[in-house]
Image (spheres, rainbow, N blue to C red):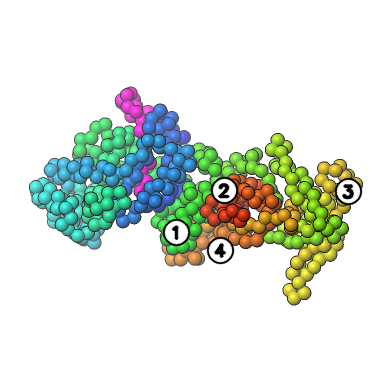
Amino acid sequence: MSDFLETVIDEVLAQSQDRTVCTRFPPEPNGYLHIGNAYAIRISHTLASRFGGRFHLRFDDTNPLREDAEYAAAILEDMRWLGYDPGPHVYYGSDYSERLYEYAERLIRQGDAYVCDLSAEELAGSRGTLTEPGRDSPYRTRTPEENLELFARMRQGEFPNGAKVLRAKIDMASPNMNLRDPVLYRILHAPHYRTGNDWCIYPMYDYAHPLQDAIEGITHSLCSIEFKDHRPLYDWVLEKLGISPAPKQREFGRLNIRGTVTSKRYLRELVAGGYMDGWDDPRLPTVSGLRRRGYTPSSIRRFLDRIGVSRDVSVLDMALLEHTLREELQPTVPARMAVLRPLKVVITNYPEGEEEWLPVSNHPDDPSLGSRTVPFSREIYIEREDFLEEPVKGYQRLAPGREVRLKGAYFIVCESMVKDPATGEILELRCTYDPRTLSGSGFTERKVKGTLHWVSARHAVRAEVHLYGKLLADGEEAVDEEKGWDERIRPDSRIVLKDCLLEPSLEEAAVEERFQFMRHGYFTVDRKHSRPGRPVFNRIVALKDSWKGGAV
């Protein structure tokens, strides 16, 4: 954890030793959490824990047009899964509606707020520019009594959307655009997912945020760097209402990941447009997407711990998150044999109708994880890429006349091929085996360089396998607004293999159980599309960094 946020907390505690540190995460329930949100959660949760304080989850649900109970439930579930459980401290900004309204009335009575009739276009045009001051609204001189009456009528629903707003009366010439009489309340005739039709006026975030913090006793309102210019307004609201001790807003740099999308706006476009398989699509950096992909909460937490906290925006490569996950999976995840692009092999000198169950270790490096037995028979499948009719230099796998070892089984030699007469495609290999070379038999007469994984044709489990890679076609640049998502998404960001063949031990694999498929990477059972007897496996991560390439 970077020292600068701890220093801020130390300063507050030095002024009041009996204050309990209290931080919060205030998501708007208009989408699912993503890795950038997890970064923000981790900062506030960790600091509260470090100082023996409290951590709150407070839903910023002040916009009925985009919010939904589904999103609120998903946010809470994802936070608990990540290990950042707020416990009993789950709050909703909508529960404070009456108190925020009363605070607004106080500002009006003090002459610090007024009802403005400018349209959205007129208001925007009057705000000025970074080099020119704004213009006072013609309604800025209304009396407190007139403003209180109009504000009450706004609440009662007498005016249509956009007819009036409540604005703070600060300084239209301020160099900070956020202080040029910002809007505090707007009219929205829309049902709210929690309060129904109780309200038709809703507070703006910059007004609601500091007051909700104060109501809950938040000591440190930690937020991302883009809110730094909003801090003077945060402080203005609290100061004008005489709230003390006031929460302290402090900012940290955002976390962005190359080659993917961490903007809620873009995530909504991808999901709503049908480009993704929901908010939990394994290609997305949403927490639910990472979970479905097969990431563990501990690997995500370890990744967030490693990157620390910066004052500036951090732009990282997905490879760092992948590397952190591999470190966790490698020592513990059992290995299995899976053939993703099958090529049939007939062992012509193996007795027809016979089978053997051969012991194979569960982990290439750790004998303590034990072994399992896999069936071997006359007909097996190997990977299509494990055979070349005309091998290139350095190729050590199967080729005509070449001998290789089958993992945990025998040496085989390719004697001939069966091809499609029309296309020349290789349909089948005819091989022989040496019965003296069973793995573990101590046979030392000759050595082979290549070892292939395989599955018995008679016992194989058919499964669908999804291979995932980088989402965006060019992860080094910002999303190009001139292009549609069809152009932006890599065609190989997801590759679906329909008829993969797996060893029989995988037939009863549990949802979210993880395995290492030999030479292919780490995989998990998809929690959304798997069915009894027909599992769907997602590749979590390749055995080595594949992020600079595609899915394969």
Q: Amino acid at mark 4?
A: Pro
User: Earlier along the polypeptide chain: callout 3 or callout 1?
Assistant: 1
Q: Earlier in the sequence, mark 4 or mark 1?
A: 1
Q: CA distance from mark 2 to mark 3?
A: 40 Å
Above or below, 89 against 136 in this view is above
The mark closer to the camera, 4 or 1, is 1
Residue bearing mark 1: 271
Q: Position of residue 497 (x, y in %)?
A: 62, 60
Q: Is residue 255 visible?
A: no
For the residues carrying marks 4 and 3, which lies nearer the camera in this image? 3
Q: In terms of depth relative to the viewer, which is nearer, 510 or 495?
A: 510
The residue at which mark 2 appears reads as 511
Q: Tell me where the magenta segment starts and ends, as one range.
A: 8-29
Identify residue type, mark 3.
Answer: Arg
- Residue assigned mark 3: 436
Instruction: Kindly identify which residue carries mark 4.
Output: 491
Residue nearest the viewer, comparing 49 with 292: 292
Residue displayed at 58% across by 43% down: 325
- Tell me the distance, in whole angstroms, between the alpha carbons under discs 4 and 3: 47 Å
Q: Magenta stretch containing residue 304, yes or no?
A: no
* Rendered location of residue 404, percent (x, y): 81, 53
Mark 4 vs mark 1, CA separation in Å: 17 Å
In the rendered image, residue 16 lying in the magenta stretch gets the answer yes
